[in-house]
Image: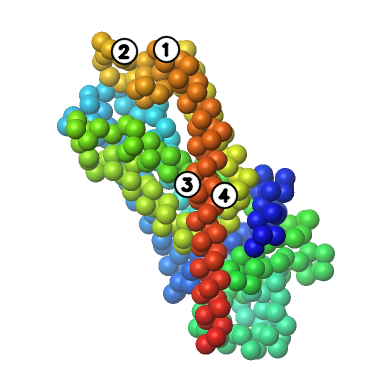
Amino acid sequence: MMDEFKREFQLKNFGFGGQFSDRSFVVPQARWCFQPVTWILYRFAAAIYLTVWWIVILIYWGEPPYYKQADTKAKWFIYVSNWSYLCLGIYFWTSAIGTLVYHKNTKFKVSSTITAGEGLELSPIDAKDQITNGYDNHGHQIYAEPQENNSHEDVEKQDSTTGMTENTSSNKSLSWNFKVTWLFQNISFTAAFFVTLLFWILDFDPETGTVTVFNLHIHGINLLFVLVDQFLIGSPYRILHFIHPSLMALVYFIFTAIYYAAGGLNEYAPDEVNGNTYLYKGSLDWERETITTAVVMVGVVFVAAPLLHLVLYGFYRIRRTLERFESCRMSRH
């Protein structure tokens, strides 16, 4: 485990370059019945649910009694919570479509040479021992995929405890669409944690605020989706990918600075005390709280985003450990 942790800090792990195969992003970590149909349905159900609620929230946003009166709905986009929700929806849609296309284009077959995960061959004897009519000896369905290249220089390595396929080839790489999925996974998972904590700890006032189904979806249900998905997916997590949510945070702060410089205001009528240049009162106001806003920006980009990403990496390690225990338990039966 320590060796695996040390490998996390290799410079190549800043990117997506050929470390894992597409299969890591299209099958769940846990064993599901009726694969891959149930997994595809789950991905699309989550994407559709988030999209429907995004449309409903846009319809009611800025309208009493659920929100304060806004001067225009276009200003929905100036808040980081809404960026986070949008990124989460993009993640689920790219994952759902990518999973569907992958399984649609893959020819599942069982032959004398079985591919259990891309690039990992089983000998005919192993195949006979482990597979009967497309199922392993634990009753879990196995999807055998055709080899593109079986040379010794072009072989992938599969984690025996998780089924995660690691690419050791120099001429194979993760498909571009799954790189996009991985990018939005890193951004949206960390952002969901951040905006939920930000809202309930710093922004929401229990004396004057009201919990509605709308702010609960943006600052609660989003995190529930992340936590559930984190323990279901089979895709990897990389410590050095903290750079992605950090860059997203930096882009957001740059956007708010440009928005302010262009004369942008929040959606409310001017407040005698706070004016209407703030986006988050006391923490993001480039006119009245310039130094505070700059400090908050540095803290979020260089401290909060990396730390929250590290928490999610911890969940990933827990998921891997649970799968290892489950694999050991199943192997005894």
- The CA span between labels 3 and 2 is 33 Å
Tell me the quarter of the picture where residue 18 sits. Answer: bottom right
Tell me the amino acid under the disc marked 4: Trp
Residue 270 shown left or right of residue 300 in the figure: left
The residue lying at 44 percent from left, 74 percent from top is 33
Q: Nearer the viewer, mark 1 or mark 4?
A: 1
In the rendered view, would you say 271 is above or below 16? above
Disc 1 versus disc 4: distance between alpha carbons? 36 Å
Mark 3 → mark 1, Cα distance in angstroms: 31 Å
- Residue 102, given in percent of the width and then of the height, sits at 57, 61
Determine whether the residue tagged by mark 2 lies in a helix, strand or loop.
loop
Name the residue carrying label 3.
Answer: 189
Q: Residue at x 67, y 74 (%)?
A: 115
Looking at the image, residue 327 sits to the left or right of residue 120; the answer is: left
Q: Earlier in the sequence, mark 1 or mark 2?
A: 2
Residue under numbered circle 2: 275
Residue found at x 50% / y 23%: 295
Tell me the CA gap for discs 1 and 2.
Answer: 10 Å
- Measured along the vertical axis of the image, is residue 207 above or below residue 100? above
